[in-house]
Structures are given as structure tokens and as C-alpha cells.
Image (cartoon, helix red, strand yellow):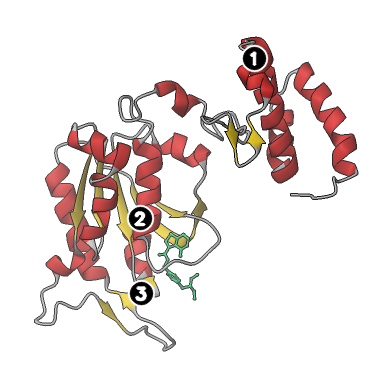
């Protein structure tokens, strides 16, 4: 998979190209990332990439000219490969979730635009952007971190990037439920013991225990995900019976609720 990124902070992307599983995959050539800096496509002596908003108001607006030239350069560099969808990371965008990640994962190439300042000139968005994507309902200082969230979420699904392909399939949200708790050595830590069933060697009972813990933590923290799993038929009769027994307890919360 290939990413072309427009950003005035190219060095930030070393966080995904140079570290961890995404870094290893990049080194192995399983994906690539080229960053195009709009400042390199300015034509004035001051290398301006922003200006004051028409109509007044706070903040600065990114100039459409350097963004357009940077995007043209990325498209020339990728040609004759098929044109790539252009995504703008934006607080006004479609909220990123695993369903959107899955939709985008089929693309061989994506162009990501990470803005700074208050906004981009709307004419650039109207003419050149296919989809606006938000990382969530909170404010960060620019589109780079949201762009890297998206890159990481896509790259870890490329076969060979995460060693154990199974752990990608078992990820939270691939089955729409939160993960169960995990334990490793020592058996006793600060007076707390590993749940005995995990030491029992009874793999059928361990699998059932993990399934129940997933259902329990999801029901407590994200009842919306239980409802989605229920209505899309991802819960079997045993799951539903367990959730019914949980419901009684959840209606009478424990002494120390989460
Ligand atoms: C006053 C209106 N603000 C919009 C909510 C201004 C503003 C704040 C922060 C404009 C741009 C930014 C920079 N953020 C992003 O570019 C961004 C973002 C975000 O702030 N939150 C979640 N997802 C994203 S994707 C890009």
C-alpha cells in the first residue's frame, strides 16, 4: 500500500515509518509513505502557505495554491498508476472507525492531506478532496496525528506487518466486542492471583471464560456495542443466556461500579 501525504511537518511521519510493527513493515517494503510539503511548492520569497481569512475572524487559512501544486506533484509521481482517493483529515469529517478502515483497506494507494491552522481554503476542498475523515470528537493541533492513526490502522492489516495474523483477526472491533483481561507471569503479583481457570489447562472452559469476560466488559463499558452485535446476529444462544444473567447484576450495580 502506498501513501502520499501533504504536510508542512514531514518529520512527524517518522513515527510510523521508523518505529514498531509499522516501521518494520516499511523497512520490508510492505508499504510506502512519501510526504509532500506544500511549503516546497510556494512561489513567493516568504514561502507563505497561509493567509488571513476573507471576511475577518480569528486564525489563518491554508492557501489553495501550494496545496494544489503539492497534490499535482504527488499525482505525477504515482502516474501511470490509477489515481488515488484524496482524504482530508478534518474535524468536520466522517468519524474514523474500523468499518471505515476496512473500506479503505482495499485501496492500493491513498493521498492524505494533513492541515494546520484554522482551515483550508474551501475551493481546494471542493475541487480536490474526495472524503473528509475525523479522528473523533476532540481537538488536536493539526491533521498529522489523525493521518498517522489512519496509516497505522491500515498498515497493521497488511499481511506480514503484524507477525501473528490471528491477533489482527482477534482485535477489538473485528468481532465488535472489547477484549478480555490478560495475565502473564508471575502467578502472584502484589497479592493478586491469576484467575485459576487460566492455569487449569481446560481449553474449552478457558475459551468460555474469555468469551464471558469479553461480553461482561463490553456490556458494562459499551452497551452500544452489545446492541450492535445482538442486532447483527453475532451473539449465539449461549452468549444471550449469559448476558441475561449479567443484566440482573448490572441493574443492581456492585459496591464499586466501573
Ligand atoms: C474553531 C473550530 N475548530 C474546528 C473544530 C478549529 C480547528 C481546530 C483544530 C481547526 C483545525 C484543527 C486541527 N485539527 C485537525 O486538523 C484535525 C482533527 C481534530 O482536531 N480532531 C479530530 N480529528 C481531526 S482530523 C484533523
Residue position for label 1: 200
Q: CA distance from mark 3 to mark 2?
A: 18 Å
- Toward which corner of the image does residue 117 lie, by quadrant? bottom left
Query: Visible in this render: residue 120?
Result: yes
Residue position for label 2: 129
- Is label 1 in contact with label 2 (beta carbons under 8 Å)? no
Image quarter where the N terminus lies is top left
Q: Is mark 3 within 8 Å of ligand 1?
A: yes
Q: Position of residue 32 (x, y in %)?
A: 21, 40
Residue position for label 3: 117
Query: Visible in this render: residue 130?
Result: no
Frontmost of labels 3 and 2 is 3
Q: On screen, 110 above or below 181?
A: below
User: Looking at the image, which residue is at 14% across and 72% down?
Assistant: 42
Q: CA distance from mark 1 to mark 3?
A: 57 Å
The one nearer the camera, 77 or 29, is: 29
Q: Quadrant of ligand 1?
A: bottom left
Q: On screen, 240 above or below 72?
A: above
Amino acid at each position: 500500500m502506498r501513501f502520499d501525504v501533504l504536510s508542512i511537518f514531514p518529520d512527524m511521519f517518522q513515527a510510523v515509518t521508523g518505529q514498531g510493527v509499522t516501521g518494520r513493515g516499511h523497512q520490508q517494503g510492505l508499504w510506502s509513505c512519501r510526504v509532500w510539503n506544500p511549503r516546497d511548492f510556494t512561489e513567493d520569497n516568504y514561502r507563505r502557505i497561509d493567509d488571513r481569512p476573507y471576511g475577518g475572524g480569528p486564525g489563518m487559512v491554508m492557501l489553495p495554491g501550494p496545496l494544489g501544486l503539492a497534490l499535482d506533484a504527488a499525482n505525477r509521481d504515482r502516474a501511470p498508476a490509477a489515481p488515488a482517493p484524496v482524504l482530508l483529515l478534518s474535524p468536520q469529517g466522517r468519524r474514523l472507525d474500523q468499518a471505515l478502515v476496512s473500506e479503505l483497506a482495499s485501496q492500493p494507494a491513498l493521498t492524505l492531506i494533513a492541515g494546520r491552522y484554522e482551515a483550508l481554503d474551501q475551493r481546494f476542498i471542493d475541487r480536490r478532496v474526495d472524503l473528509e475523515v475525523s479522528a473523533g470528537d476532540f481537538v488536536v493541533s493539526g491533521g498529522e496525528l489523525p493521518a498517522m492513526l489512519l496509516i497505522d490502522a491500515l498498515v497493521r492489516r497488511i499481511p506480514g506487518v503484524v507477525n501473528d495474523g490471528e491477533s489482527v483477526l482477534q482485535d477489538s472491533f473485528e468481532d465488535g466486542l472489547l477484549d478480555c483481561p490478560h495475565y502473564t507471569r508471575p502467578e502472584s503479583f502484589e497479592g493478586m492471583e491469576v484467575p485459576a481457570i487460566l492455569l487449569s489447562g481446560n481449553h474449552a472452559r478457558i475459551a468460555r471464560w474469555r468469551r464471558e469476560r469479553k461480553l461482561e466488559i463490553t456490556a458494562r463499558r459499551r452497551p452500544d456495542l452489545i446492541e450492535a452485535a445482538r442486532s447483527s446476529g453475532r451473539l449465539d444462544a449461549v452468549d444471550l443466556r449469559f448476558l441475561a444473567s449479567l443484566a440482573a447484576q448490572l441493574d443492581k450495580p456492585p459496591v464499586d461500579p466501573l
